[in-house]
Amino acid sequence: QKEVEQDPGPLSVPEGAIVSLNCTYSNSAFQYFMWYRQYSRKGPELLMYTYSSGNKEDGRFTAQVDKSSKYISLFIRDSQPSDSATYLCAMTGAGSYQLTFGKGTKLSVIP
Amino acid sequence: GAGVSQSPSNKVTEKGKDVELRCDPISGHTALYWYRQRLGQGLEFLIYFQGNSAPDKSGLPSDRFSAERTGESVSTLTIQRTQQEDSAVYLCASSLGGGATDTQYFGPGTRLTVL
């Protein structure tokens, strides 16, 4: 079993839909959880960062962490064609610099 | 300001040749990372540099891979005797410090194709 599991998709939704992206993990030492967005032929860019359990909201984006279930989610409200990208979850433990990434989910938002 | 830059953006080489990939981090960032991204796979950690400390080479897949960093600036990743399985996008990232809360900023990557 890989440390981080993420459905690679692809996921195709109509513009304006609510998108839910998820990752599960097995390492209980993970405490810091991130979502990166990667456009085609570009490097990943940090979208959301959450420490431990709970929710964090930033505009149309909401990140949720449920440590008891070892499950993290990213919700995108009112999705736009510009949200079309690959979304990568990443996580690490306290005092660590090594990020463990999921495979990424490719999202297409259709106008 | 300028972000992380990498060169070349694309590299096609023949099996058995050596290649050198370059990364220019954001000025002032003490930490530098190399990752490999194979098609359909997540990012794989390769190596980590932090200031003048000894690098963490634990992610390098074989002794054909090596990397150097000059002070807190440019880094080069060298792959000797390339194999077809080395084909991937090689991403470099830098961060202000080397902690879990320090955001890693990624370059655009070098797409390596080994024929």
Image: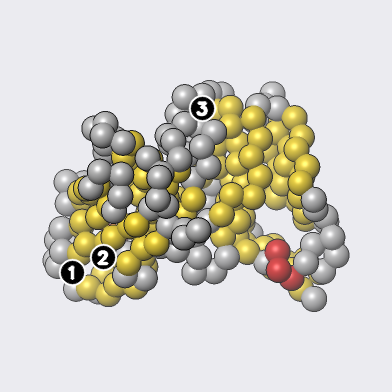
The image shows residue B45 at horizontal and vertical percentages of 38, 44
Please report contact status of discs 2 and 1: CB closer than 8 Å, yes or no. Answer: yes
Q: Residues within 10 Å of mark 1 (few under 14, many from 20)?
A: some
Element type at marker 1? Answer: loop
Asked if one can make out residue B39 in the rendered structure from this viewpoint, the answer is: no
- How many numbered circles are shown? 3
The image shows residue A100 at horizontal and vertical percentages of 48, 40
Name the amino acid, label 2: Gln
The residue at 27%/75% (across/down) is B12
User: Is A85 placed left or right of A96 in the picture?
Assistant: right
Which label sits on residue B84? Answer: 2
Q: Can you identify the residue that label 1 sits on?
A: B15
The residue at 81%/69% (across/down) is A14
Name the amino acid, label 3: Gly
The residue at 82%/69% (across/down) is A15
Which label sits on residue B102? Answer: none
Which label sits on residue A93? Answer: 3
User: Is A85 placed left or right of B58 in the picture?
Assistant: right
The image shows residue B46 at horizontal and vertical percentages of 33, 45
* Colour option used: secondary structure
- Label 2: chain letter: B
Name the amino acid, label 1: Lys
Asked if one can make out residue A20 in the rendered structure from this viewpoint, the answer is: yes
